[in-house]
Amino acid sequence: MLQAQLAPYVASGALQLLLRHRTASTDMTNDRVRAIAVRDADTGDQRVLHAAYFADATELNVLLLLTFAEYPVARTCFWSYRRNLDRDHFAPGTLASDVTIVNWGQNDYSAGTLIDVPDEVATARVAHVKAFSLSLLYWLQTDAPRPDGGIGWEGLWLRPDVVGTADGLAVHAYVREADGFAPS
């Protein structure tokens, strides 16, 4: 959907999307990003990008690390309810249930970051994040207090068919460290 919205800008040459690229290095002068080298994940080819602004649309906001920018490790303490599909907006029988992404402070992982550590540490932390998310789901299913005085929401379950992963968890960890923009 996002690519469809950006298509006119890509077609006109006003915007270039570099999918499946990883940031390799940055060229910094006086706390300003002058250029970014990126590597194509499929071919290994590297290219250097020059722009007035760089938007980091990666899952981990890697420009923070490579630009040596200071960043807070975000902690949210409010509940965000994100209903992606509401069965009341469809013809009866279309959806068996609503679909919600759980992105709450209760499942924020605070034991470490993912962007400023070696790949093997980040991989281990992602495994911990998944286990942490599963433990929250289990608590919601079995022990969470309900407004009616009962406990647990046994109707909650993961939806691999919706998110496109074998385990039903998100494709990538949601990282709150920054909003992803690095002015040059």
Image (cartoon, helix red, strand yellow):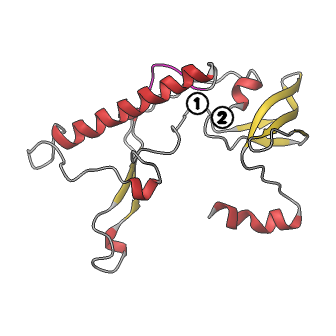
Q: Residue at x 68, y 67 (%)?
A: 4
Residue 155 appears in view = yes
Name the outermost residue toward the left.
149
Q: Are marks 2 and 1 in contact (CB under 8 Å)?
A: yes
**Is 136 a magenta residue?**
no
The residue to which callout 2 is attached is 61
Mark 1 Cα shell of 10 Å, populated few (<14), some (14-19), many (≥20): some
Residue 83 appears in view = no
Camera-side residue of 131 and 65: 131
Tell me the quarter of the image containing the C terminus. Answer: top right
- Residue 31 spot, x, y in % from top left: 84, 23
- Magenta extent: 108-114
- Residue 142 spot, x, y in % from top left: 16, 40
- What secondary structure prevails in the magenta region? loop
Q: Amino acid at mark 2?
A: Asn
- Residue 163 spot, x, y in % from top left: 45, 53
Q: Is residue 32 above or below residue 104?
A: above
- Residue 19 spot, x, y in % from top left: 73, 50
Q: Amino acid at mark 1?
A: Glu
Report the disc number at residue 134.
none
Q: Quick check: 67 left or right of 82?
A: right
Q: Place residue 57 in its image quadrant.
A: top right
Q: How many labels, in total? A: 2
Q: Residue at x 42, y 58 (%)?
A: 162
Q: Residue at x 32, y 62 (%)?
A: 98
The residue to which callout 1 is attached is 177
Q: Place residue 121 in its image quadrant.
A: top right
Comes first in the chain, label 2 or label 1: 2
Q: Residue at x 79, y 69 (%)?
A: 8
